[in-house]
Amino acid sequence: MIRSVVRGIGSALPRRIMKNTDFEGIVDTTDEWIVQRTGIRQRHIAAEDETTASLGEAAARAALDAAGLTPADIDLVLLATSTPNNTFPATAVEIQQRLGMRHGFAFDMQAVCSGFVYAVTTADLYLRGGMARRVLLIGSETFSRILDWNDRSTCVLFGDGAGAIVLEAAEGQGTIADRGVLASSLRSDGTFKDKLFVDGGPSTTGTVGHLRMEGREVFKHAVGMITDVIEATYTQAGITSEDLDWFVPHQANRRIIDASAKKLGIAEEKVVVTVDRHGNTSAASVPLALSVAVADGRIKKGDLVLLEAMGGGFTWGAVLVRW
Ligand code: ACO
């Protein structure tokens, strides 16, 4: 059977680092409060000339280099983002153009923080369905542009950045010993819309709007939703937490990550944490964390890696991949 195998990974971060102490003159907060409640110590914030498209392009080029491929080898550019450069056209098409591609096709996916997990699952279906042989899959965000910088309960939590992978169709045996995407589960439930949303849009206010979140409510649901969808993915693949080499969760809050890993019985040393240095970069958080763990030599070819995310909608999901 066809498996969607990771050929390369790359990432890109804005030049400017904003530390917790940099917020102290902007809103009524402290480094201690932010670290204690979230685990975040710093985040990268995009300058005017850094956009979802430019960061996405840089991550895409890095992933192509790592894969030893060029844009000519790609059939589909898939971008997970909630902060596109324009309402339309899709920012994926702009990245396709920046890469000099006039072949293949490109589109954006919008599942907020779950965007990358949704996009991996979508790319896997295109590859297994035979409509593409190689997918350039990007998560890129500039959440700093939709933050209310007067709201201390949200502006300290998010950051900007991009991560990308190249997925390639390869022949597998149909067992979990195969490399590639092995199992995935996706969920959404719109009854939670008002817990985490942006209060503007083209069809309602005609504005871009700002992110609004009832943090405590999101927190309350997060661990249960994350662990449920991971258990469904385990069942599909016939594995348990013991079989994992690495757990790469969405990087929203250190306490959510720790509580989810504990409930699932995943050993602390298998959990990849980057929320301390990136903050919550929404759809970019999982590929950014993957990129760090691949670059520092933790994640190696053949490792069993579990990806997970939960975000606005609510949307949530998990993907099991053998690297
Ligand atoms: N600095 C200082 N105090 C603050 C700050 C801040 N930056 N922000 C809020 N507070 C205050 C509140 O005003 C409140 O004060 P009060 O008790 O006087 O009213 C107090 O701190 C406690 O506020 P809570 O919101 O109850 O704090 P909590 O412990 O829940 O932590 C947090 C807040 C960090 C947002 C947490 O709820 C959380 O992480 N939630 C989940 C967020 C998340 O994971 N989102 C993921 C999805 S993101 C996406 O999909 C786009």
Image (spheres, rainbow, N blue to C red):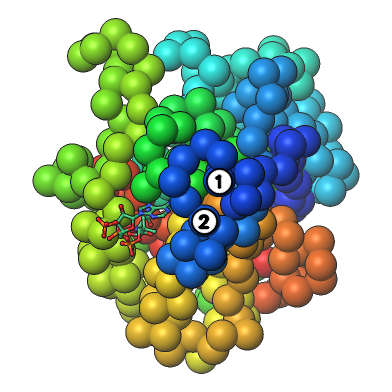
Mark 2 Cα within 10 Å, few/some/many (few <14, many 20+)?
some
Whether residue 41 is visible here, answered yes or no, is yes
Q: Compare marks 2 and 1 and give the one earlier in the sequence.
A: 1
Taking the spot 19% from the left edge, 41% from the top edge, the residue there is 193
Locate the C terminus and report the quarter of the image it occupies.
bottom right
The residue under label 1 is 24
Residue at 52% of width from left, 36% of height from top? 26
In this view of the protein, which residue sits in the foreground, 170 or 294? 294
Q: Mark 2 points at which residue?
A: 30
Secondary structure state at the residue bearing disc 2: loop
User: Residue 303's x, y, as percent?
Assistant: 67, 76
Q: How many numbered circles does the render carry? A: 2
The amino acid at mark 2 is Thr
Residue 78 image point, x, y percent: 55, 33
Q: What residue is shown at x 56% (from left), y 43% (from top)?
A: 23
Q: Which of 72 and 288 is in front in this view?
A: 288
* Beta carbon of the mark 2 residue lies under 8 A of ligand 1: yes
Q: In this view, does 172 lie to the left or right of 296?
A: left
Vertical relation: 28 (above or below) 92: below
Q: Tell me, yes or no, whether the two marked residues, 2 and 1, touch with CB atoms within 8 Å.
A: yes
Amino acid at the residue labelled 1: Glu
Q: In this image, 264 relative to 103: left or right?
A: left
Q: Quadrant of residue 260?
A: bottom left
Q: In which quarter of the image is ligand 1?
A: bottom left
